[in-house]
Structures are given as structure tokens and as C-alpha cells.
Amino acid sequence: MVGVDEYATRKGRHYGTVLVDVETRRPVDLLPDREASSLAVWLAERPGIEIVCRDRAPFFAEGASAGAPQAVQVADRWHLWHNLSEAAERTVAQHRFGAWTRCRCTAQAAGSHETGTTAATSGGSPTSRSAADLC
């Protein structure tokens, strides 16, 4: 099983490909670029590879398919967790924004500047508030 990921020698300027033995967690080789053709050549020279563990980069998918068509391609654990956490953050942010918008609309419909019934004016509970106060 081989792991495939990118590395940067100059972040934002020059990237290469690192190949890792997943079982020993040790680097096996470094390729000078992230080209599908480079990965395909490297994999083709090693026909015994049965599993390619990679991120979702399209150039790694193409290279793995071309160089090791017999290999099963799987997503690596780090990228699965990273993608899941990003999706969860987006969902929570959308929920918060949606709840805030609904609350704001409710407050505006109820008259956000009106204070409603208060203890001072009606002798009621000091907890009586307008919809705007509840948001």
C-alpha cells in the first residue's frame, strides 16, 4: 500500500509528490512535481501495488488510474477527517445564519423597536420582552 500526497519546497510556488509506505509510515520516494504522468510512471514501475491511498486531487486520481489500474484507490484518513470537519463547519454556519435571519425577521414583523409589555407599564412580569429582545 502506498500513500500519495503533495509537499511544498516553496509554498505557493513549487510542489512535488511524496510517496509513503503506509504500513511503515516512512517516505519511499519524492517526485519533483504533482503531474499525473510522473505518478503514473512511478506506479507502473511497481506492478505489485494493490492499494493507493491519496487525497482527492484529480492529478493523483489520474496518475493512479493510469499507472496502477489494478490498484484500489482509497481516501486517506487525514483528508477524510479534514473534509468532514469543513462540511460540519459549513453546516453549522448555515444553520446559525438561518436561525439569525429567521429571528431577525420575526423581530421586525413584531416591531423591533417596540418594547412590548413591561413590568413598569403594566405591572406584569419583568421578563416580558419584545421579539427583538429574544434574538
Image (cartoon, grey):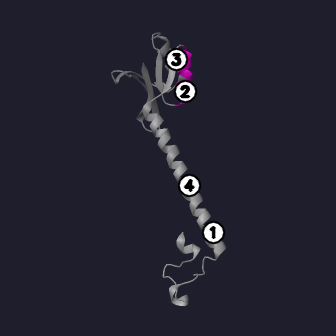
Q: CA distance from mark 4 to mark 1?
A: 16 Å
Give the x, y percent position of residue 72. Answer: 51, 19
Query: Of residues 100 and 32, which is closer to you in this image?
Result: 100
Give the x, y percent position of residue 126. Answer: 48, 82
Query: Of residues 131 and 25, which is closer to you in this image?
Result: 131
Type of amino acid under label 1: Thr
Type of amino acid under label 3: Ala
The residue pinned by badge 3 equals 40
Above or below, 116 against 109 in this view is below
Type of amino acid under label 2: Phe
The residue pinned by badge 4 equals 95
Q: Is residue 19 left or right of residue 73?
A: left
Q: Main secondary structure of the magenta part?
A: helix
Is any part of residue 33 visible from this angle? Answer: no
The residue pinned by badge 2 equals 59
> Is residue 66 part of the magenta span, yes or no?
yes
Q: Secondary structure at mark 4?
A: helix
* Pointers 4 and 2 in contact (C-beta within 8 Å): no
* Pointers 2 and 1 in contact (C-beta within 8 Å): no
Crowd class of label 3 (few under 14; some 14 to 19; many from 20; radius 10 Å): many
Give the x, y percent position of residue 13. Answer: 47, 36
Crowd class of label 2 (few under 14; some 14 to 19; many from 20; radius 10 Å): some
Type of amino acid under label 4: His
* Pointers 3 and 4 in contact (C-beta within 8 Å): no
